[in-house]
């Protein structure tokens, strides 16, 4: 009887040992800096639900918005250490790791969102992802925000010369620095989480961001003018900690890929929809309060900005910056 019992215990142990992967649970922390009601915020939440559903709860996704966990590029170091497992920093924030991603920051490089998506989904996008992989991250997908608009308080920005002497908040980016120097502006690097107070207190006079970031962080409430310039693009590369990825069994890696594919399709929809909807809300605010003037540039004014800032491209032809092949490759993507 005794022996029998012992045997049974052994059997149970062996059965448990045979299925450790199925029982193992994972926590995936996703850190970002924007509000939940933005393209990135909504897509992160969508990804959370989708992956938890596909993995049947074996991966617990925890999203931390609004710089709660890490500010701007600090998250890239945290990912390396696996202190956080996922992030979607904007391209400029990869400056120290893969400066070539600043390709997407070059002003007036993309004709429209379709052109941008063709570049991201094509050869140029793949090369950039490979560069990020070589640096020890898992490059999952490109996510959209949208085209940036200029906001200011000292003076309305109608022609490039209006930028002269104004202090512009920029992300840490050589391209954005060059962009504002090209129009005589004074670029100041500042983390996203400090932009509202910077504008409110006049530490900076002006800024650039897509409508969705402006609206959800109320930047329009601490600026007097909003110029619809669509001069540059803001988007993200979703990255994962390599250590975390390698720790996942193959079936969960497949679930991550599928959830990311679904979230990316949704993300592009959220980006288009939120930037439009929130622009209407900013217009309502402007009409109601009279505290914000919205400036729509005509073609001639827009050409003046294009000519003034696109002359910076050759400064980035060096392969250690962005590289002529990538810049021309993007421009010529059909
Ligand atoms: C910014 O710093 O302005 C943006 O990168 C914020 C973001 O992630 O959209």
Image (cartoon, rainbow, N blue to C red):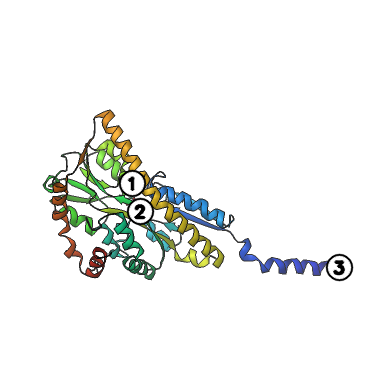
Q: Quadrant of residue 238?
A: bottom left
Is 42 positioned to the left or the right of 178 in the image? right
How many numbered marks appear?
Answer: 3
Disc 2 element = strand
Which part of the image, by quadrant, shows the C terminus? bottom left
Is 189 positioned to the left or the right of 140 in the image? left
Please identify, in this view, whether the residue under mark 1 or under mark 3 is nearer the observer.
1
Q: Could you tell me how far apart the alpha carbons at marks 3 and 2 are, in whole angstroms?
A: 66 Å
> Where 121 sits versus 302, above or below?
below
Is 19 positioned to the left or the right of 247 in the image? right
Q: Mark 1 — residue?
A: 193
Q: Could you tell me how far apart the alpha carbons at marks 2 and 1 are, in whole angstroms?
A: 20 Å
Q: Position of residue 212 (x, y in %)?
A: 33, 44
Q: Quadrant of residue 249?
A: bottom right
Is 203 positioned to the left or the right of 277 in the image? left
Q: Position of residue 82 (x, y in %)?
A: 46, 61
* Residue depicted at x 15% and y 43%: 158
Q: Are marks 1 and 3 in contact (CB under 8 Å)?
A: no
Residue 305 appears in the figure: yes
Q: Where is residue 13 in the image (x, y as percent from the top left)?
A: 72, 67
Q: Mark 2 — residue?
A: 144
* Residue depicted at x 45% and y 59%: 261
Q: Could you tell me how far apart the alpha carbons at marks 1 and 3 are, in whole angstroms?
A: 66 Å
Say which label, 3 or 2, has the lower sequence index: 3
Q: Mark 3 — residue?
A: 2
């Amino acid at each position: 009887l005794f022996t029998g019992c012992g045997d049974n215990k052994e059997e149970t142990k062996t059965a448990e040992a045979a299925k450790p992967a199925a029982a193992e649970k994972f926590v995936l922390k996703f850190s970002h800096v924007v509000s939940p009601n933005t393209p990135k915020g909504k897509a992160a939440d969508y990804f959370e639900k989708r992956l938890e559903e596909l993995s049947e709860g074996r991966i617990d996704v925890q999203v931390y918005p609004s710089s709660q966990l890490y500010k701007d590029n600090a998250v890239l170091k945290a990912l390396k250490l696996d202190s956080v497992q996922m992030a979607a920093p904007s391209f400029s924030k990869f400056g120290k790791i893969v400066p070539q991603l600043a390709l997407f920051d070059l002003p007036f490089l993309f004709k429209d969102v379709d052109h941008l998506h063709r570049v991201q989904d094509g050869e140029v996008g793949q090369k950039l992802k490979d560069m990020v992989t070589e640096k020890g991250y898992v490059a999952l997908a490109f996510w959209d925000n949208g085209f940036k608009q200029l906001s200011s308080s000292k003076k309305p920005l109608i022609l490039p010369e209006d930028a002269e002497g104004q202090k512009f908040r920029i992300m840490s980016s050589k391209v954005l620095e060059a962009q504002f120097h090209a129009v005589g502006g004074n670029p100041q690097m500042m983390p996203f989480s400090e932009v509202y107070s910077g504008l409110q207190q006049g530490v900076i006079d002006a800024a650039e961001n897509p409508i969705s970031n402006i609206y959800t962080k109320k930047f329009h409430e601490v600026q007097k003018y909003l110029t619809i310039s669509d001069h540059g693009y803001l988007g993200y590369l979703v990255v994962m900690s390599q250590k975390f990825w390698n720790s996942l069994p193959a079936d969960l890696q497949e679930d991550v890929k599928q959830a990311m594919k679904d979230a990316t399709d949704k993300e592009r929809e959220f980006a288009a929809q939120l930037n439009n909807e929130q622009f209407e809300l900013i217009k309502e605010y402007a009409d109601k309060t009279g505290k914000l003037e919205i400036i729509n540039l005509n073609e001639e004014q827009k050409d003046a900005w294009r000519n003034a800032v696109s002359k910076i491209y050759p400064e980035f032809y060096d392969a250690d910056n962005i590289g002529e092949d990538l810049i021309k490759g993007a421009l010529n993507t059909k």
